[in-house]
């Protein structure tokens, strides 16, 4: 069974780059262009890992993260916040809300993000196979 990834990101170029990389890796990927779409996807489909941009229209990524963390049946979903805000206060807030990890988008290529996703899955989902 393929690992399921939700990518909530409002930058269409990034969505396209990540989509290509994740699909080449054999992941089952769903995309949301804003927080409202992310919540809609989450109501119908449980990902193994959610990559969530913080700054999105309609519903921000922190509210999407809170939604995931408030669902007991989603306790095992790995949550990675995507941001361009690489400061300590942002990191503190993200971790306080229960995120597994955060990635500063401008610091990583799609290949590096894909490798980070595989590393997190390997660590947190030991019993799952890609």
Image: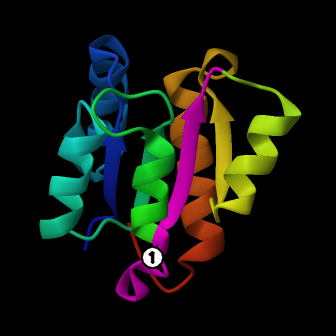
Q: Which of 50/130 is in front? A: 50
Q: Is 9 drawn above or below residue 70 in the view shown?
A: above
Pointer 1: residues within 10 angstroms few (<14), some, or many (20+)?
few
Residue at 64% over, 65% down: 98
Q: Which residues are magenta?
A: 69-84
Which secondary structure, mark 1? loop
Percent across and percent down for residue 123 are 66, 71
Residue at 48% over, 82% down: 75
- Identify residue for label 1: 70
Percent across and percent down for residue 30 are 21, 47
**Residue 110 visible to an observer of this rendering:** yes
Q: Which of 125/89 is in front? A: 89
Percent across and percent down for residue 83 are 59, 28
Residue at 68% over, 50% down: 94
Q: Is residue 56 left or right of residue 82?
A: left
Colour convention of the picture: rainbow
């Amino acid at each position: 069974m393929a690992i399921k990834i939700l990518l909530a990101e409002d930058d269409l170029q990034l969505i396209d780059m990540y989509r290509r990389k994740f699909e080449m890796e054999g992941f089952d990927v769903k995309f949301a262009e804003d927080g409202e779409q992310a919540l809609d996807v989450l109501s119908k489909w449980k990902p193994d890992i959610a990559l969530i941009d913080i700054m999105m229209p309609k519903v921000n990524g922190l509210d999407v993260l809170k939604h995931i963390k408030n669902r007991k049946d989603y306790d095992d979903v790995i949550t990675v916040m995507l941001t361009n805000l690489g400061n300590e206060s942002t990191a503190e807030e993200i971790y306080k809300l229960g995120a597994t990890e955060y990635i500063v988008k401008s610091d990583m290529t799609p290949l590096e993000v894909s490798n980070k996703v595989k590393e997190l899955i390997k660590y947190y989902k030991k019993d799952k196979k890609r």
